[in-house]
Image (cartoon, rainbow, N blue to C red):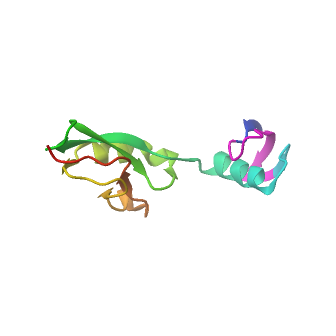
Amino acid sequence: MEKELICVNCPVGCRLTVTVENDTVTNVTGNNCPRGKAYAESECIRPERILTTTVRITGGLHRVLPVISEREIPLDQITDAMDAVRGVQVKAPVSVGDVIVENILGTGVNIIASRSMESV
């Protein structure tokens, strides 16, 4: 099976053609650098995404605090990760980079605050 992708690893945006056989990438063409090949292999076999959302915060200027995953988590776990984060509530003050959820779903990835929020 062939898949067409546009690489998002750099501003060039190479148009990739990826051949997949038996859940294995057998060929990648169109990439101008090795990062394109790595992206195609990851995207076709086990795609990953950064998770961005909010959690409830008490005692802060706003009612919610934006959070983000430190790095990508498997796309097939995004819904479960959102369910896990949905029930989280923190108390102000919070600093950018503070760990809000440690090791989400056993992935080894922390969910961290993406902004600071002082107490009011």
Q: Position of residue 118 (x, y in %)?
A: 22, 48
Query: Does the magenta run of residues contain 13?
Result: yes
Picture quadrant of residue 3? top right
Q: Position of residue 30 (x, y in %)?
A: 86, 43
Q: Residue at x 79, y 56 (%)?
A: 34
> Which quadrant, please, contains the N terminus?
top right
| Residue 110 can be seen, yes or no | yes
Q: Give, as a single range, the part of the protein colored magenta.
A: 8-26
Q: Position of residue 35 (x, y in %)?
A: 74, 54
Picture quadrant of residue 53? top left
Q: Position of residue 75 (x, y in %)?
A: 51, 45
Q: Is residue 61 left or right of residue 104?
A: left
Q: Total label count?
A: 0
Relative to the observer, which residue lies in front, 41 or 49?
A: 49
Q: Residue at x 15, y 43 (%)?
A: 58
Q: Is residue 117 left or right of residue 28?
A: left
Q: Is residue 117 left or right of residue 105?
A: left
Picture quadrant of residue 38? bottom right
Q: Is residue 62 above or below residue 73?
A: above
| Residue 23 can be seen, yes or no | no
Q: Residue at x 78, y 40 (%)?
A: 12
Query: Does the magenta run of residues contain 87?
Result: no
Relative to the observer, which residue lies in front, 115 or 21?
A: 115
Q: Residue at x 45, y 56 (%)?
A: 70
> Which quadrant, please, contains the C terminus?
top left
